[in-house]
Image (cartoon, helix red, strand yellow):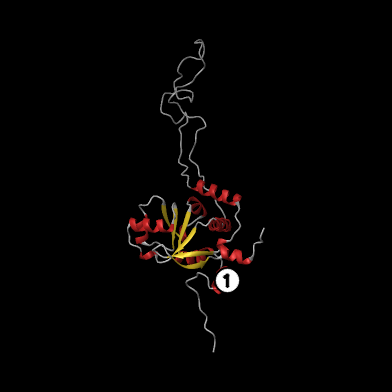
Amino acid sequence: MPRKTKENKESKLNVPLYNIKGETVDTIKLPREIFDVKTSPKLLAQVIRVYQANQRAGTHNTKTRSQVIGSTRKIYRQKGTGRARHGDIKAPIFIGGGIAHGPKPRDYSKTLSKKTKRVAFFSVLSNKLAEGKIKVIKGLEKIEPKTKRMIELLKKLKITNTLLILPEKIENIILSARNIPYVHVSSVKTLNAYEVLRYQDILFMKEALSELINNFLVKEDRQKIEKQGEILSKRKTTKKKA
């Protein structure tokens, strides 16, 4: 079997850059700090459990026999009837009575550390890239706010069940995608591992990648990417002293 060389790893980080006509206009290199992270199934399972638990309202409630409205009179005498002994009609054994050991309101929320969330998020993105499910587009902000235009673009890109990631809220993109049932629009700030896992294809706006780097990477990694001249649109320039 051929060995995995550095060149092979680098080539996997290169993805086509599309325009709003669905044409390939360039190639863009994704940062390895985000898109080349080892996937941990156990970590992803933990993140999914936490996210789903946090979606639960926890407002379920049942009434016990003391909370049910009704008479507290003993329904018949204790002895001499040949029947089982009973108290009042509100006992759980009777129809319309209270519920024994039923659910009560509770808080299901769980927490994860920032580092755990970040690693899980990066590993999901890395897995999507390895599957060839990540695409990058530029100039999408120029699209007409029409559902027809967005459907045409997605057909040209050959993607369905898509998570479209924006750098921020862009009204005409949201309007053009909101009536398409298999497309979900999200911004970088609200993005999480569970949301990425739910969709088959991921479509990034080019500007969203810059926001992703600025929001999720530590300063040292940002500076490294900046030196390599990758993606970051807002690079700081230092003037040399004369």
Q: Where 239 falls versus 163 (above or below)?
A: below
Q: Is the residue marked by circle 1 packed among few (<14), some (14-19), or many (20+) residues within 10 Å?
A: few
Of residues 232 and 168, the one drawn nearer to the viewer in this rendering: 232
Residue ranking furthest to the front: 1
What residue is disc 1 on?
A: 224
Task: Name the amino acid type tagged 1.
Answer: Lys
What residue is drawn where x is 51% and y is 79%?
237
- Quarter location, residue 159: bottom left
Figure label count: 1
Q: Is residue 117 left or right of residue 167?
A: right
What residue is drawn where x is 50% and y is 42%?
106
Q: Secondary structure at mark 1?
A: helix
Q: Where 108 falls versus 219 (above or below)?
A: above
Of residues 127 and 27, the one drawn nearer to the viewer in this rendering: 27
Residue 81 picture location, percent across and down: 49, 10
Q: Quadrant of the C terminus?
A: bottom right
Q: Is residue 148 left or right of residue 166?
A: left
Residue 155 picture location, percent across and down: 40, 56
Q: Quadrant of the N terminus?
A: bottom right
Of residues 154 and 241, the one drawn nearer to the viewer in this rendering: 154
- Quarter location, residue 116: bottom right
Residue 156 picture location, percent across and down: 41, 58
Q: Where 220 falls versus 115 (above or below)?
A: below
What residue is drawn where x is 51% and y is 49%?
51
What residue is drawn where x is 63% and y is 66%?
6
